[in-house]
């Protein structure tokens, strides 16, 4: 069964049409990477899936159920989808542990003990147990992003959306975050990932989609996209990436 | 804010200036202090000489600066000043709550909430637009005259309501600035975890917003503490009216100085606390490198 299905998704900001009819389907346990230039609509697509942006057209299904239907409880949908942002967006006035337990306690109504047990298990798994009482600004960028991933995972989401999660990190901190994502993929997490890390996408993705000007221009296995792209635009994009030394 | 322009980045100067609540010293260490003391002494001498040489000084000295007058009126005024402090403390609680409600209403997004937003805007505009003394007069003389059953007739009560209404307009604007200073990505992060709009506001937005506006909030409370004297216009005997009474009995003005001293005893510590909090906040933000 498909975990996520997008049908003709359209989104405009004023006059500017950012998504121009996106069709995309993710099976359970599939990891799909969205690549493409800045402004091609990758982040907007993820925000639309999480209902952070209202659509101008098209439909989105989560686990077979339409979530863009009128009258759907958006809060309920969002608790089933985890999203991790480029800028971490941790809550600066809360400790690491409180960041992670906030939503399980307030939204899932877990007891404090249950929520903390769940949080500590996850923090421990990703090497953050000793940071539980720190405030976010005392952590490195890599640690902050791992906390943000843990915060999303604590809701036990059906689907994870990752929005350029390594773009704001110093190069030496990228690997620790990517290894967390790799571990999630190996654990069978369904993920839709917008990324600039081409070698990572090649490595981890079951499918790669090239977004260009609000449309999925080309999609296929990493091998097909990176080794023998069919579209001229995809070739140009990958050539520029190679020139920049990013592949 | 005064003093922003000559803010220094030197940590040593920063530290000392915080201790002294924004007073800046040129130079370094003991030499700097010596220069500051000397220039202060010279300045004060000039002022004192100028004032005491003025033609009206003997008369002013007799009517204002008679130590006997000041100290004899002090106990009465201090007793009356208790009412000012009570009004201040009670109003402050209601203002903090009421203004927060107004600010939250004003920050609700989307067309559906337009009427509430409009109401909040009209409220803050009116509250800040009408002179406080008029609001107090209108409520203090008007509301009891209605003789509605169940509505308090006390002038102090209505004066308090007036102060709450006026100051809530200002404080709501302070809160609103705080709410708007929290980056929208914080709300997105909270909502993306499934928190409702209200939960996001309560857990994520407001705690950050309120922390940032504590210094300006204190600033407004210094104003409120002073404005409790406006209650006197309703004939209520608080510190200023008591000073009036004493002054009328002795034909001198020492009682006003006594009243002023009492107000200052509360407002100056508040002002120093505010400066200290602002400086601490600035330093914290510089330390973390955050551009909040």
Image (tube, coloured by chain):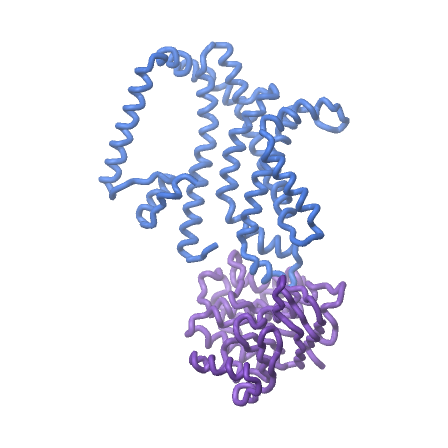
Chain colours: A purple, B blue
Q: Quadrant of residue B33?
A: top left
Return the x and y of residue B81 as percentages of the image width and height.
Answer: 52, 24
Residue A132 seen in the current view: yes
Furthest-left residue in this view:
B31
Return the x and y of residue A232 as percentages of the image width and height.
Answer: 55, 84
Residue B193 seen in the current view: no
Report the front residue among A31 and B238. A31
Tell me: A70 left or right of A232.
right
Quarter containing the N terminus of chain A: bottom right
Q: Residue at x 42, y 43 (%)?
A: B276
Q: Residue at x 64, y 44 (%)?
A: B101
Q: Quadrant of residue B289?
A: bottom left
Q: Residue at x 36, y 12 (%)?
A: B56
Return the x and y of residue B275 as percentages of the image width and height.
Answer: 43, 41
Return the x and y of residue B150 as percentages of the image width and height.
Answer: 75, 28
Report the front residue among A25 and A140. A25
Q: Residue at x 67, y 44 (%)?
A: B118
């Amino acid at each position: 069964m498909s975990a996520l299905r997008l049908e003709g998704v359209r989104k405009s900001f004023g006059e500017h049409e950012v998504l121009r009819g996106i069709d995309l389907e993710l099976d359970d346990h599939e990891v799909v990477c969205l690549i493409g230039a800045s402004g091609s609509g990758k982040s907007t697509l993820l925000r639309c899936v999480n209902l952070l942006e209202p659509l101008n057209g098209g439909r989105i299904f989560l686990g077979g159920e339409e979530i863009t239907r009128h009258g759907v409880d958006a809060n309920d949908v969002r608790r089933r989808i985890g999203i991790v942002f480029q800028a971490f967006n941790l809550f600066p006035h809360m400790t690491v542990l409180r960041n992670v337990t906030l939503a399980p306690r307030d939204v899932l109504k877990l007891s404090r003990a249950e929520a903390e047990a769940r949080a500590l298990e996850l923090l421990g798994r990703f090497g953050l147990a000793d940071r539980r009482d720190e405030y976010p600004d005392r952590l490195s960028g890599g640690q902050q992003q791992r906390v943000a991933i843990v915060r999303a995972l604590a809701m036990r989401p059906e689907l994870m959306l990752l929005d350029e999660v390594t773009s704001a990190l110093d190069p030496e901190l990228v690997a620790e975050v990517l290894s967390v994502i790799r571990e999630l993929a190996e654990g069978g997490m369904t993920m839709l990932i917008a990324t600039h890390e081409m070698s990572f996408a090649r490595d981890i993705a079951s499918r790669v989609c090239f977004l260009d000007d609000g449309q999925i221009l080309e999609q296929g296995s990493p091998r097909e996209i990176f080794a023998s792209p069919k579209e001229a635009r995809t070739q140009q994009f990958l050539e520029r990436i190679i020139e920049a030394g990013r592949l | 804010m005064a003093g922003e322009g000559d803010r220094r980045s030197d940590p040593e100067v920063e530290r000392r200036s915080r201790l002294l609540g924004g007073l800046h010293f040129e130079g370094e260490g003991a030499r700097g202090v010596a220069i500051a003391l000397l220039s202060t002494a010279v300045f004060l001498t000039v002022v004192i000489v100028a004032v005491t040489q003025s033609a009206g000084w003997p008369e002013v000295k007799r009517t204002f600066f008679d130590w006997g007058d000041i100290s004899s009126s002090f106990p009465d005024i201090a007793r009356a000043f208790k009412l000012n402090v009570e009004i201040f403390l009670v109003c402050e609680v209601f203002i903090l709550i009421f203004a927060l409600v107004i600010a939250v209403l004003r920050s609700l997004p989307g067309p559906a909430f337009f009427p509430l937003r409009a109401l909040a805007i009209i409220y803050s505009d009116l509250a800040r637009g009408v002179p406080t003394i008029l609001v107090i007069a209108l409520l203090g003389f008007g509301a009891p005259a209605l003789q509605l059953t169940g509505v308090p007739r006390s002038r102090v009560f209505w004066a308090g309501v007036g102060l709450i209404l006026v100051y809530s307009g200002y404080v709501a604007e302070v809160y609103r600035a705080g709410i708007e200073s929290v980056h929208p990505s914080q709300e997105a992060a909270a909502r993306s975890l499934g928190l409702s709009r209200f939960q996001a506001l309560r857990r994520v937005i407001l705690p950050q917003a309120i922390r940032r506006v504590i210094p300006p909030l204190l600033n407004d409370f210094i104003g409120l503490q002073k404005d409790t004297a406006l209650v006197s216009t309703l004939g209520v005997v608080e510190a200023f009216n008591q000073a009036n009474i004493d002054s009328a009995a002795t034909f001198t003005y020492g009682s006003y100085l006594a009243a002023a001293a009492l107000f200052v005893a509360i407002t100056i510590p508040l002002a120093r606390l505010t400066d200290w909090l602002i400086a601490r906040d600035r330093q914290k933000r510089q330390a973390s490198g955050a551009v909040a």
